[in-house]
Image (cartoon, helix red, strand yellow):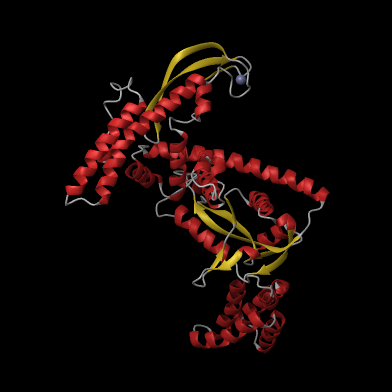
Amino acid sequence: MSTPCPGYEPCVCHNAEKSESLAVRAARLAESLEREVRHFIVATDENLGDIEVRIERQSREIQRQATEKAAQSKADATPPICPVCKQKLGRVSGDHGRSFESRFGTIRVVRERGYCKRCSKWRFAADTALGLEETAGYSPRVQEMAALLASKMPVAEASVVLEHLTGVKVPRASLDREAKRQGQRARQLRAQLDQQVCLTTARAVQTELVLEPYQMIIQMDTWNIRERDDWGQTQKLRRHGREPERWHWVYTGTCFRLDHRGKTAGGRPVISERGFVATREGLDALRQQLHAEAMRRGLGQAAGALVIADGAVWIWRLADDRFAHARQRLDFYHAVQHLAAVGKALFGDDQQKLKDWLRPLAKQLKHQSAIKVIERLEDILESLPKGAAAETVAKEVNYLKEHQDRMDYRAGQRRGEPIGSGPVESTCRQHQCRFKRPGEYWRPRGDEALLCLELFWRDQRWSLLFPHNRQIDPSKN
Ligand SMILES: [Zn+2]
């Protein structure tokens, strides 16, 4: 449901007041605000919310005018130089107007247009200077708002929330387009940043970095996303013997320094600095992005590294390939699930027997050694008659043997290392809260773009994408 925003009707008076200086307008606004304050004091049915809305509404027009004035002055001062190749533009003509949505409402700018011979293109140098190039008509701050909201909530909701909170009107379809455009920009920037890490790494190898006494923890997992590929083609595909595939893996990773893990006053575990990676573009993309992220977080100088994950084969292959020097650990809870599978084969649906059998075994795995646990299971296996139960137990024993070296839980705990992959699992859950809402379908280009935006935010690199944020919170982002 769209919430009406009575405070944000477009102003009809600003053309008549164009010749007025900002100072005169500001003085008039101050007088009007004084009147509002006097009214508020005696209005018994109003609380602070009412005056907040009215002050916001009344101040908006002068903010809009100041923004428009700034934009026009900057446009006037921009020399006719091609923003791409830096050549002087020819056939320059003025008086080309353009309206766009700014943080404070619609503004209009008149600027010059010139032809770049080298690029064989008409150029508006002022648009680049103002940060408006290639956009559908939204200022950089509005572009940012669209990007942030769409990465956090469905676009229809984002459009309504944006208007309700800020008065900025961006219809649903435009917001979707703008957010995806920003997402594509984020992807390009991510590729550049990852490339820079590769170059820096190559140089660092030559200079031999001094190692610091911390461990880098790397975790990986997957979740799946539903896409609208082959939409409407189901019958046709089935006639050709193909079942349409709508669910696709999103490969996810996280990395952090062990000495950045701590506890809140209430005892809740927290990680103060942590890198995130998520991609729909397959294992190669994950491998590259996760390595770059780990390097940015200090992998190159870590005394050691540890990969923790569930038992998926692709994870260990990737770890062997990209993090060859890292130790590997199977997520403890995942190992326990395999023990539970043995218990189920032995006791069927008798939950109490299963629990009584599993608890001491899990304890032994956690505090003693995996070898002893495996030996116990082998003894059990020998005593079993041939059949389904024996087959299951044999399968699980093989699995645990294969991962024996990855189950050093006692040693890990003594070193203060995590034994579970909880952090990456919670990251996956958080992504799914956004990307797996009922009725939502994605397209590969769109979901990768929005995921990338979400990662810039999480990884505190938002201000690289929207540099005007440096002014808001220099400590974060
Ligand atoms: Zn050019």
Q: Quadrant of residue 83?
A: top right
Residue at the spot 58% in from the left edge and 77% down from the top edge: 341
Residue 100 visible: no
Residue 392's spot in the image, x, y percent? 62, 78
Residue 14 point in image, percent of width and height: 30, 25
Instruction: Judge from the rendering whether residue 141 lies leftward or rightward of residue 286; answer left or right.
Output: left
* Extreme residue toward the top, this view: 91
x, y (%) of residue 381?
67, 85
Q: How many marks?
A: 0
Residue sitting at x 28%, y 21%: 16
Task: Give residue 334's quadrant in the image.
Answer: bottom right
Q: In screen coordinates, is 379 left or right of 76?
A: right
* Ligand 1 location (quadrant): top right
* 265 or 313, nearer to the observer: 265
Image location (x, y in percent) of residue 131: 51, 30
Residue 138 visible, this orientation: yes
As drawn, is 178 to the left or to the right of 423? left
- Residue at image x 16%, y 52%? 44
| 380 lies above or below 306 | below
Seen from the viewer's position, the closer of residues 378 and 121 is 121
Q: Which residue is drawn at 51% across and 23% down?
A: 126
